[in-house]
C-alpha cells in the first residue's frame, strides 16, 4: 500500500514538473504579453498542484514502469 502511494506521489510530482517547465518556456515565448497571461499560466500550475487528477490514456510519456495509473488509485 505504501509503495502504491509513493508511486502515485512520484508520478504526480513528475507531471507537475513537466507543467512547470512548459509554463516557463511559454513565459519566455510570451515575454511581451500582458501580465494577465502570465498569471493565467501559473493558475494552470496551481490547479495541477491542488487537483491531482489524471485522465485515462492508453499512451503516456510519464507512466512509470510497473506502476499503472489504476494501481495508484487516483483515476
Image (tube, grey):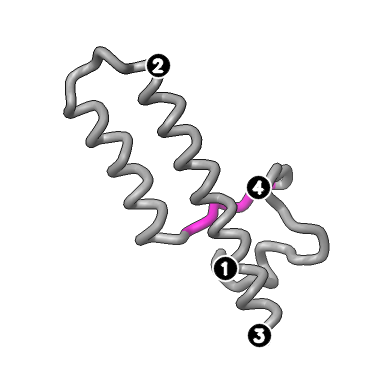
Residue sitting at x 61%, y 64% = 10
Which segment is the magenta one? Answer: 53-57
Q: Nearer the viewer, mark 4 or mark 2?
A: 2
Mark 3 vs mark 2, CA separation in Å: 41 Å
| Classed neighbour count for the residue bearing mark 2: other residues with Cα under 10 Å, few (<14), some (14–19), many (≥20) | few
Tell me the tag on residue 29.
2
Q: Is residue 45 above or below residue 64?
A: above
Q: Mark 3 vs mark 2: which is more N-terminal?
A: 3
Residue 43 lies, in percent from the top left, at 28, 43
**Residue 29 percent across, percent down from the top left:** 40, 16
Residue 28 in the image, given as x and y percentages of width and height:
39, 21
Are there few (<14), some (14-19), or many (20+) residues within 10 Å of tag 4? few
Q: From this viewpoint, which residue is outermost toward the bottom? A: 1
Can you tell which of label 1 and label 4 is closer to the viewer?
1
Which quadrant of the rendered structure holds the C terminus? bottom right
Q: Which residue is mark 1?
A: 9
- How crowded pointer 1 is (Cα within 10 Å; few <14, some 14-19, many 20+) is rated as some
* Cα gap from disc 4 to disc 3, whole angstroms: 24 Å
- Which residue in the protein does label 3 denote? 2
Disc 3, SS: helix
Amino acid at each position: 500500500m505504501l509503495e502504491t502511494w509513493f508511486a502515485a506521489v512520484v508520478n504526480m510530482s513528475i507531471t507537475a514538473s513537466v507543467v512547470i517547465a512548459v509554463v516557463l518556456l511559454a513565459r519566455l515565448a510570451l515575454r511581451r504579453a500582458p501580465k494577465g497571461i502570465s498569471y493565467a499560466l501559473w493558475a494552470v500550475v496551481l490547479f495541477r498542484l491542488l487537483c491531482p487528477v489524471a485522465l485515462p490514456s492508453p499512451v503516456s510519456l510519464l507512466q512509470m514502469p510497473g506502476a499503472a495509473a489504476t494501481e495508484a488509485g487516483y483515476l
